[in-house]
Image: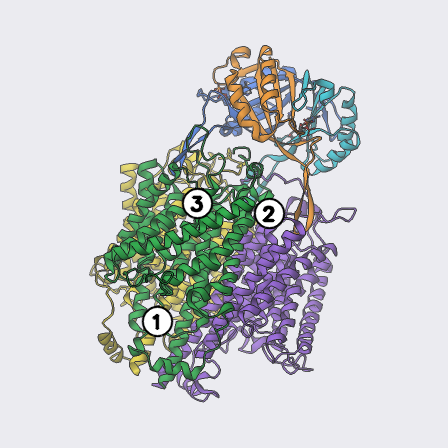
Chain colours: A yellow, B purple, C green, D cyan, E orange, F blue
Amino acid sequence: MEQQIFHLQYALDTFYFLICGALVMWMAAGFAMLEAGMVRAKNTTEILTKNVALYAIACVMYLMCGYHLMYGGGWFLSEITAPDVTKTLEEFAGRENGFEGNAIYSKASDFFFQVVFVATAMSIVSGAVAERMKLWIFLAFAVVLTGVIYPMEGSWTWGGEPVFGLYSLADVGFSDFAGSGIVHMAGAAAALAGGLILGPRHGKYTKDGRIQAIPGANMPLATLGTFVLWLGWFGFNGGSVLKLGDMSNAHAVAMVFVNTNAAAAGGAIAALIVARVCFKKADLTMVLNGALAGLVAITAEPATPTPLQATCFGVIAGVLVVFSIVFLDTRKIDDPVGAISVHGTIGLLGLMLVPLTNSNASFFGQLVGAATIFVWVFGMSFIVWAILNALFGLRVTDEQEFEGVDQSECGVEAYPEFFPSTKYVE
Amino acid sequence: MEQQIFHLQYALDTFYFLICGALVMWMAAGFAMLEAGMVRAKNTTEILTKNVALYAIACVMYLMCGYHLMYGGGWFLSEITAPDVTKTLEEFAGRENGFEGNAIYSKASDFFFQVVFVATAMSIVSGAVAERMKLWIFLAFAVVLTGVIYPMEGSWTWGGEPVFGLYSLADVGFSDFAGSGIVHMAGAAAALAGGLILGPRHGKYTKDGRIQAIPGANMPLATLGTFVLWLGWFGFNGGSVLKLGDMSNAHAVAMVFVNTNAAAAGGAIAALIVARVCFKKADLTMVLNGALAGLVAITAEPATPTPLQATCFGVIAGVLVVFSIVFLDTRKIDDPVGAISVHGTIGLLGLMLVPLTNSNASFFGQLVGAATIFVWVFGMSFIVWAILNALFGLRVTDEQEFEGVDQSECGVEAYPEFFPSTKYVE
Amino acid sequence: MEQQIFHLQYALDTFYFLICGALVMWMAAGFAMLEAGMVRAKNTTEILTKNVALYAIACVMYLMCGYHLMYGGGWFLSEITAPDVTKTLEEFAGRENGFEGNAIYSKASDFFFQVVFVATAMSIVSGAVAERMKLWIFLAFAVVLTGVIYPMEGSWTWGGEPVFGLYSLADVGFSDFAGSGIVHMAGAAAALAGGLILGPRHGKYTKDGRIQAIPGANMPLATLGTFVLWLGWFGFNGGSVLKLGDMSNAHAVAMVFVNTNAAAAGGAIAALIVARVCFKKADLTMVLNGALAGLVAITAEPATPTPLQATCFGVIAGVLVVFSIVFLDTRKIDDPVGAISVHGTIGLLGLMLVPLTNSNASFFGQLVGAATIFVWVFGMSFIVWAILNALFGLRVTDEQEFEGVDQSECGVEAYPEFFPSTKYVE
Amino acid sequence: MKLISAIIKPFKLEDVRESLAEAGIDGMTVTEVKGFGRQRGHTELYRGAEYQVDFLPKVKLEIAAQAEQVDRILDVLMSVAHTGRVGDGKVFVMDLEQVVRIRTGETDMEAI
Amino acid sequence: MKLISAIIKPFKLEDVRESLAEAGIDGMTVTEVKGFGRQRGHTELYRGAEYQVDFLPKVKLEIAAQAEQVDRILDVLMSVAHTGRVGDGKVFVMDLEQVVRIRTGETDMEAI
Amino acid sequence: MKLISAIIKPFKLEDVRESLAEAGIDGMTVTEVKGFGRQRGHTELYRGAEYQVDFLPKVKLEIAAQAEQVDRILDVLMSVAHTGRVGDGKVFVMDLEQVVRIRTGETDMEAI
Ligand SMILES: Nc1ncnc2c1ncn2[C@@H]1O[C@H](COP(=O)(O)OP(=O)(O)O)[C@@H](O)[C@H]1O
Ligand SMILES: Nc1ncnc2c1ncn2[C@@H]1O[C@H](COP(=O)(O)OP(=O)(O)O)[C@@H](O)[C@H]1O
Ligand SMILES: Nc1ncnc2c1ncn2[C@@H]1O[C@H](COP(=O)(O)OP(=O)(O)O)[C@@H](O)[C@H]1O
């Protein structure tokens, strides 16, 4: 009869992973909508195409080799097969800590949960390089990031492998619960490398060096995207507890939901107030970025803070992200959706906040981990972008950029019937 | 080994709350999209900002004091801590009704489920006062409603406290399963109070007293919002069973899903037919309101009706909501999205339908409960709105209203590239 | 104590059905958004109205008679009542295969899961006949399809009844796990019958016989719809395992999630590449159709393929769907969203792929099953459409079609404030 | 015959149209335009960066009228479209050689 | 040279353009406008309340042509843009003093 | 007084406006239009089928100016709006009989 209980625990934990994974998959739609809302109408079809295609590529590459590099499991998941029930039951019975010991669940559900993470990392990139990069070059980069760069880095962190056999991040006290650094800062590092080589959009900076804002075309889409991400994040962080099936873990999952929500709320409110104070207006896009910043910040450790602490972390993130966006803009790093600030700056912030509530992490460990991730992802990405640039050029022609990449890359307008009144405003 | 079963039941019920809560959280996106689709383009960014901000404020206020006022749990949830496993197991063992007794689950998941309810109540308000109220005044009201007005009312109903120590609603036979009255009618009452002080949008009523319709700018958004709400409602009502983890409760949850869906379907069809008969056209916005009306009506008691009864309740709601909308319009109560009818009129209807299928409720009890909620929420809201009006004025200037509050409040246009052809049609 | 375990298994499996059902319900929103994005602005409100109304009608009709015809359960679900706990526990104890035997769960959750499938079948039709069919005629057809045509066909397949008492599809080795044929090809067959009688949209084919493309009005909506469908499909296929509550089944559910995702990814990438090669541009709409094609193809058997096989099946579907769309276009079968290709052609493909990985199915059986479904649904639909055509005419007048059915059918414009620049381009 | 082309503030359109109708002028053609003139656009902030909205939405009315009607039309415009604030707009009067009504083939006076 | 400005029903644009091309007139500039005239807008119901859609979508064609071509153009318009129902539109002819082609600097006759 | 109506490529608008301002011409009215002329539209593929995009987005500038200013304006247009590629556009000059500034009632010269 105990075996039946193990059956149920296996089933429950598997289901929990699948549902959390489905929520994270939904984040792909969130990024697509957020980015589609923040670019100009003439570049909307292309950013949508990028988002669908990068998600598909991430899934295929991670299935092909990424998961194997990160956790084992065989090329093409060849080692993920139906569970041998008898052996698995024995495994259950033999767990340290018994029933409250580590979770045992379908490897396939683990893959499903992990694969949507890699897509998230890649989604971050598309926003930052929007409106000027060639579609196919971007997708080529997606192949490398999702197939190799991210899985390698993942193997050193969540995978527990030493970094090139040199040092182990776990040993130095690095902790990144759900991936503020491993997923978000990594994505931002790849984006930053691409953005530096790519340069800003035409018209973003005037000849005399002034910043010229380029408003996004569709605010409801951007807002929808943010809500989708907010919802999906419950799966992102909630699933990262890695077990649901006993009392303490179930409570931990619940705390993660509460804290994730609290941080997002704190971030949104903080950014709203900062925008109001600094710019005199309630800039919606900053509020959206603030909510996302709160989410990124709490991601490194959503389980140990109290709800009040989580809210405060969100507030800090919401304040910081506004200044980070403005600062990067003055540095002429053009990031149409604010991805580098939201995921990069705040991803780092998230890592550094961990030791405040989790004594297993140290500031030193967090720094070493952050540096490892950043150096690897930024460096490798820079090399790949640079090679692609040398071979094919990252950027569309000026004329294509002026007319919009929808036409040159996709041949399909996003809103063919709506007369864009500022078509000629570059 | 029984303890392991308790572990699993705890985990399953906690998970059930979290998933239902996540679905309700998703309703925030639904309200945002619905409202963004039903206002004019020039007021879209502002309504989006309101929706994101009110959700964030609701989360923070309810965490800070609301939950404590309603259910206890400490300011800032300070009393919600990790479960003492041994003690909780004993609690399990000691339940009346044994395994089929009341649910025991993480308090954090309960908070998460409850917090998204308070946001729902507040979301109702934003639609009704759209296109003319100052953003910051609205948010100030949100602080009070979500921090005090709603939690007080909630403590008398779901919280089980006597009303100001005078009488107990449970004693008089009041029953509101998932909140037709406690959440929806309450939100509508706050909206009505605000709307009365605020007055209608310019151009809604001509000088000679005729009603002038003001079409919403984006029907796909409004439809999306309705579907999101429909989906989220499964969590809203389904989670309100409060336990999943035994046979009878699991079946009850399933019945709630079936009935919730049936009522929405009935409401949509009924409103479609009424619109066709009365207005000669299949007015989509009425169909959407009809579906929502069905959902609101069944919310007070989704478990006891048969699916056929649920469908009929939905039909009644779908018919009534159309007439309510038209009637309020003739009364010059301008409600751009129909929130007062959908959530107020039909919220009351929902309460009055309960005794038909649930013998624990009496018509008298329902009336007393409805009156208590309405008087409290409407009265308090009226006072708060009136104070805010006296101090700062609720309304933007005429010029700002003409140009759109997006510009004056947010400085960001929702669709900057689409030439609004009726910009000059006030 | 075993009984408590049964309680939990019952609760877990019920919950699993409900969550999967909720995901499938979400697909209704996906179809609505996809179709709203692929039609012209002037026909958008009408397609939205159709989608909301058909979902509502499907729910009511299936509740009224469809479920009873397909699986029994009584008219109006009258036989679905609260479980008799003692009897159900005995049923649990007496299962063949014991704990790993067939699932026992709330019949209401089964209904909920099944009802959203009918709606899916009907949603397929609305896209194919968009922009020219009368709203009320369409809804009348919906009543018949969801109330009779689909349930009859469903009773022969999933219901296990012999076809008109003549032959049993199960016996000939027909297998359709989640409905590539039963749901998708059936929907496409009904759509094809309607489309043939209805004829193409004005302007789709020039007098000299050339095809004239008619771009969809809103690509972000179409993309959102596809992501929604992708997400919902996890419920569609995942729930079709029909049991979660033991190790093998839980793993099967997980594999279904992985394979469903892999097939969609493969389909999207394949269609992207084919579009690039054949049309020189990355046609987003083809990418979206490719992802959906991958999903439809894997639906007939998502459990037995390896993830690599699933990806390949998706690739085949993604390639085929592009050619199918182009081919149907040359045959002057005008299908604004590509529904007949995605669900019909690929639905058949899905059925024929089953024997490759599932030895319980034979090519012969699949052919017989496909033929049975197609002949029945196409034939019956043709008759119903023809009768409706004879009595009322399926099609709006030319003038109404020119002005857009939003005005004639709904009286509400979808985007009243955006000046459609091509209003005069028929 | 004259063609009067008036650039006015959008929110005055409804009033102008009604007043013209009262003055017996029923036909007109309206175009949404953008105006540049003394009235300057405004600067907006988006994500902390400025951008200049140069153009101002205006509405152009084109009215074909008999020469005798011009003064009446100008009067209406001067009184109804007038706010006294910069950006009220301009009226241009041009000579119109020929007018044809497509429906009937009527020309000139009868066609207006 | 003359400037012909024709207000027509939108759905006639394609036919008119083709017929003009057959008549040797290739260049034109098209603007979307709203017309007010004898043809009245319509009343719609939205959520049970009426609203008046006053304006009717029309299309304005502007064609610079030589004086000799005017009649031919008018003929085309009268025959192709004509439905006989109210709202078919008007044609206005004005004198054009000067035409310049920006690409080449050609003027007047050569520039058309 | 003259009314100058120039059809130009949209992406030249900003430059033209600045150059005109430098040349002392501050007021103008801009309309988005569609051009047909020697420059052909393009063919696009959508879902494997072709469709013809006939019209080309252009911008129409209307400038009321004193007769003496016309040449200066033409010069600016010829130099700044010029790319040398087909589709650069046309300039039309018409006579303007009367101009009124609604805000002040000033007429003609003072009103420009
Ligand atoms: N020279 C001009 N040619 C054409 N249109 C003009 C001219 N000057 C002004 N306009 C139009 O008139 C509008 C109002 O002009 P402006 O100079 O801003 O204010 P005012 O008419 O009060 O002096 C402008 O926005 C523009 O559309
Ligand atoms: N006096 C006028 N000045 C400018 N445009 C006019 C005038 N009269 C009519 N129009 C334009 O011509 C269109 C058709 O005119 P209308 O009176 O409705 O029908 P019809 O031309 O058949 O008599 C109007 O919608 C308007 O755009
Ligand atoms: N006869 C005409 N009447 C009015 N507008 C014209 C005429 N010919 C050309 N145009 C306008 O000028 C634009 C450019 O003309 P086009 O013949 O394409 O090139 P180009 O000016 O270089 O010869 C056209 O798109 C149209 O808007």
Nearest the viewer among A355 and F36 is F36
Quick check: do tags 2 and 3 share a chain? Answer: yes
Disc 3/disc 1 C-alpha distance (Å): 39 Å
Q: Amino acid at mark 2?
A: Cys
Examine the rendering and report whether any part of residue C320 can be seen: yes
Circle 1 residue: A13
Q: What chain letter is assigned to the residue under label 1?
A: A
How packed mark 2 is, by other alpha carbons closer than 10 Å (few <14, some 14-19, many 20 or more), is many
Disc 2/disc 3 C-alpha distance (Å): 21 Å
Q: Where residue A32 sits in the image (x, y, percent)?
A: 43, 50
How packed mark 3 is, by other alpha carbons closer than 10 Å (few <14, some 14-19, many 20 or more), is many
Circle 3 residue: C337
Disc 1/disc 2 C-alpha distance (Å): 48 Å
Task: Tell which residue pokes out farthest to the left in this image.
Answer: A165
Circle 2 residue: C410
Q: Which of label 1 and label 2 is nearer to you?
A: 2
Nearest the viewer among B352 and C354 is C354
